[in-house]
Image (cartoon, grey):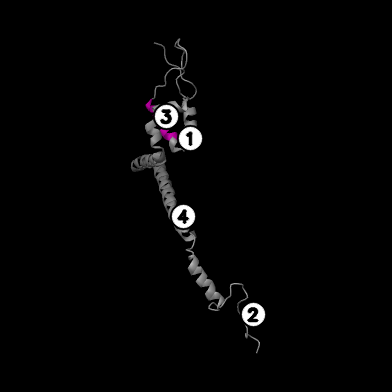
Amino acid sequence: MAEQEFDLFGDPVRQSNGRRGRPKHVPSQENRNKVIVLLAMGWSNERIAGALHVSQPTLRTYYFSELKARDIQRDRLDAHRLMLAMEEANKGNVGAMRLLDQLISKSDLALTTGRLGDAQRKAAAKPETPGKKAQEKLNAHKVLGGDDTASDGWGEDIKPGSGMH
């Protein structure tokens, strides 16, 4: 049995088996992990299929369970990195302690920014506008002089009897 050859990126080189066409794709755990990492990085199905040298239908056929969990893959990757850093920091690895501190700071910043963003969105939300009838009442009140500043911006300057005596 001859040893299998691999290309520059570690993928097995396909040898001609005497039959026409491309051999059937055989999914491996390594390829499953590659799909998970690429999903975590936000890659599209087209890019992932290209990286694996398969068509998009083949990608969807063999890696459907990984593709189904697309939305949570980034969180899973971050959690895995955090756990690895924690394990190494517990062993006394100073570099891992520094990395763990950076990851925690990054997470805290994201949480704080998210909270600030929510607060800013609430503050920037449109103020509640009065209904049609309430707005008409408000306008009538302003015209009758119930408001010290007229809506035209002149204010007290042109009111009859003001400042002429």
Question: Marks 2 and 3: which is nearer the front?
Answer: 2
How many C-alpha atoms fall within 10 Å of the one at disc 2: few (<14), some, or many (≥20)?
A: few
Q: Badge 2 is on which residue?
A: 158
Secondary structure under tag 4 reads helix
Between disc 1 and disc 2, whose residue precedes?
A: 1
Image side of residue 160 versus residue 137, left or right = right
Instruction: Examine the rendered structure and indicate whether residue 91 appears above or below residue 127.
Output: above
In the rendered image, residue 33, in percent from the top left (x then y), is placed at 40, 31
Element under disc 2: helix
Query: What residue is rendered at 47% in x and 31% in y?
Result: 48
Q: Earlier in the sequence, mark 3 or mark 4?
A: 3
Residue at which label 4 appears? 117
Amino acid of disc 3: Arg
Q: Amino acid at mark 1?
A: Ser
Label 2, label 3: how many angstroms apart (C-alpha)?
75 Å
Q: Which residues are magenta?
A: 28-38
Real-space CA distance between mark 4 and mark 2, rounded to the nearest whole angstrom: 46 Å
Q: Is 112 located above or below residue 73 in the figure?
A: below
